[in-house]
Image (spheres, rainbow, N blue to C red):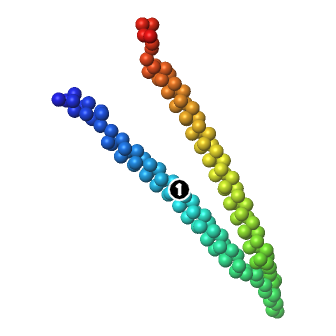
Amino acid sequence: MKQNLLCAFWKDEVGAILSAELVLLATLGVIGAVVGLKAVSQSVNDELLDVACAFRSLDQSYSYTGLRTRGAWVAGSKFQQEPVKISVKKLRQQAAKDRHRMEKQQSKWQREIEREVQRQRQLRRQQERPERRRQRPRRSSHEP
C-alpha cells in the first residue's frame, strides 16, 4: 500500500506544469518590476534636476554700500551671482555627464553578470557530462 502510494506520487506530473507556470509568471513579474522601477528612478531624477534648476533660478545676488558716521564706519559688500542661463546650462551638462557615467557603470555590471551566468552554465555542463557518461548503458559483446 505504501509503496503503491509512493509510486503514484513519483509518476504524478500534474504539479510539474503548475510549478513551471509559476516560475514563468514570477520571472515575468520580476522583469516587469525591474523595468518599472528603472522608469520611476529616471523620472525621479529628472524631477530633482528640475527642482535644482528652479532653486538655481532664484537670484541670490546682493550689494549694499558702506555706512559712515562720525565715530564709526562699515564697509560695503557685494555678491554677483553667475547668470542663471549659464549656471542652469552647466547644471544640465553635469546631470548629462552623471547620467552617462551611471549608464556606463550599469552596462559594465550587466556584462559582469552575463559573464558570471556563462561561467555558471559552463560549470553545470562540466558537472553534467560525467553523469551522462555514467548513465549510458554499456553494450555487451553478446548483443548484435
- Whole-percent x and y of residue 69? 81, 92
- Whole-percent x and y of residue 30? 48, 53
* Residue in the foreground of this view, choosing between 12 and 26: 12
* Residue in the foreground of this view, choosing between 79 and 16: 16
- Whole-percent x and y of residue 36? 53, 61
Q: Is residue 119 above or below residue 52?
A: above
Q: Where is residue 68, by image quadrant? A: bottom right
Binning the other alpha carbons within 10 Å of mark 1 as few (below 14), some (14 to 19) or many (20 upward) gives: few
The answer to whether residue 110 is left or right of residue 26 is: right
Q: Is residue 140 visible?
A: no
Q: Is residue 99 above or below residue 6?
A: below
* Residue in the foreground of this view, choosing between 111 and 125: 125
Residue at x 33% of width, y 42% of height: 15
Q: Which image quarter is the C terminus in?
A: top left
Q: Is residue 138 visible?
A: yes
**On the image, numbered disc 1 is attached to which residue?**
34
The amino acid sitting under disc 1 is Val
Residue extending furthest toward the top: 142
Q: Where is residue 79, by image quadrant? A: bottom right
Residue at x 57% of width, y 60% of height: 38
* Residue in the foreground of this view, choosing between 73 and 40: 40
Q: Which image quarter is the N terminus in?
A: top left
Q: Is residue 48 above or below residue 108?
A: below
Residue extending furthest toward the bottom: 70
Residue extending furthest toward the left: 1
Residue at x 66% of width, y 56% of height: 102
